Image: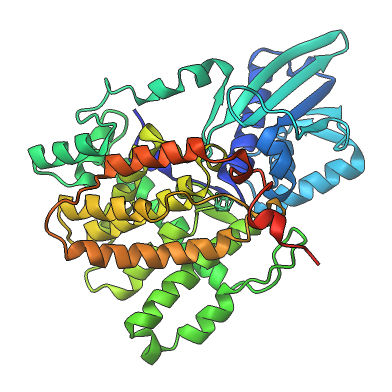
Amino acid sequence: MLGALDMFSIGIGPSSSHTIGPMKAAATFINLLEELSMLNSTTHVEVNLFGSLALTGEGHGTMLAVINGLCGHNPKTVDPKVFVSCVEEIKQSGFIYLNNKHKIKFSYDNDLLLHKNEFLLQHSNAMRFIAFSNSGVLLQEDYFSVGGGFVVNKAQISSYADFASDADVPYPFKTATELFSLCKKNNISIATLVTRNELGRKTAKEFYEEASEIVQVMHESVIRGLNTEGVLPGGLNVRRRAPGLYKKLNIPTIASSPKEQRLLAIAYAMAVNEENAAFSRIVTAPTNGAAGTIPGVLEYYRNFSSDVSQDKLVEFILTAGAIGMLYKYGASISAAEVGCQGEIGVACSMAAGALTAVFGGTLIQIEKAAEIGMEHNLGMTCDPVEGLVQIPCIERNGVASSKAIDIAYLSLLEEEAGIISLDHVIKTMLQTGKDMSIKYKETSLGGLAVNIVNC
Ligand code: SF4
């Protein structure tokens, strides 16, 4: 069964499905090649990107990610500067060191093939890696980046729905009804439930430290983003706005007003997504495109609540993670499958529910907040201009943060469950995503992506 912290991974921008996923896939392929003792016989590697990865790969850094993966780099630890510079070196030299040890010729133009009009049946984010020796094909593998940095191979994708195996935890759940009933029956919080579910795999201390690391990296990405000026890479000439907003708002007397606090949450979220767009270190939450929403709300809670403690910050992350799991089980967090409702919609739902929890909300109020957080993002399309995770993504995270905060306050005023449950809205999100035209699912073939001319 998934764990609550699986919804977060420390990585590099700008996209979980188009950067982190492909990087992991390439690294997995190279590691497999080495495990099978084929690495040293490899003379040539060919990478094929299909569908959405080919259509928006340029803007999402997919090619950079694949090459980094072939070099053996890891999204969590790679230096953001090396992530870009190593590809430049490979382009110039015409050589690559597979897994940082086996040197072969590599042509950026001829060995990285984009199949923009071809979608593999299993998933629209598909990759095929082929390794050759002097005598022919050594190894060929297909991988699918299924959202949130998760990667599966051909065998795994057919049984992917079964990843929710519940045999190994004391409180198995796949739906909101199951999760909230378990909490009620055992008189425990969501954070306690997901912690107990981890205890077969790690100690409570290890789990707490992992959650704390996520809290810390989120906080650092907010601070870095608020203090880094300039223009984002990619050619759209998008100026970083978060530092300017922060300067205007972070005046002690002003920042004490609820209006400015809410605007600061927007600036915090935008700061993270500007960092994400600049290939910097962020936490996938639950995706990179949506990486700012949860840190924006968390930073708001950290700065403007009276009862903040490390335990509370961890409770926030664990509650958000549990809500994210419900979408992973019941719908999707992949924009290529369900549009932006699966990214920023899910992040808004996670953040609203988590904030309600740390504000002391009841289970009914937490569920209501998570439900409202998605209900009013239903149908949201994915249409990034030029395939860059910048417009509308950065501002959309800011707005989602502010929305999640209002939803938490609204939910705290409610005492009874509403007509629409969280499970209803998760099911609706999936159905809406399935009905959505492919143009609006991370292909940059519709919406804002085709109505903005880059001058
Ligand atoms: S529009 Fe939404 S789903 Fe699409 S890339 Fe931007 S953040 Fe991700």
Q: Position of residue 351 (x, y in %)?
A: 35, 56
Figure check: 84 above or below 71: below
Callout count:
0
Q: Residue at x 44, y 75 (%)?
A: 264
Give the residue furthest to the top. Answer: 135
| Residue 240 in view (yes/no) | yes
Which quadrant of the structure image shows residue 131? top right
Of 112 and 327, nearer the camera is: 327
Which quadrant of the structure image shows residue 443? top right
Figure check: 351 above or below 28: below
Q: Position of residue 260 (x, y in %)?
A: 40, 82
Q: Position of residue 142 (x, y in %)?
A: 65, 21
Q: Residue at x 27, y 20 (%)?
A: 167
| Residue 99 in view (yes/no) | no
Q: Residue at x 66, y 49 (%)?
A: 446
Figure check: 26 above or below 13: above
Tell me if 338 is positioned left or right of 171 in this view.
right
Coloring basis for residues: rainbow
Q: Quadrant of the C terminus?
A: bottom right
Tell me if 101 is positioned left or right of 174 in this view.
right
Q: Position of residue 25 (x, y in %)?
A: 62, 30
Q: Residue at x 32, y 58 (%)?
A: 352
Of 90 and 179, nearer the camera is: 179
Tell me if 304 is positioned left or right of 245 in this view.
left
Tell me if 350 is positioned left or right of 227 in this view.
left
Give the residue furthest to the bottom. Answer: 253
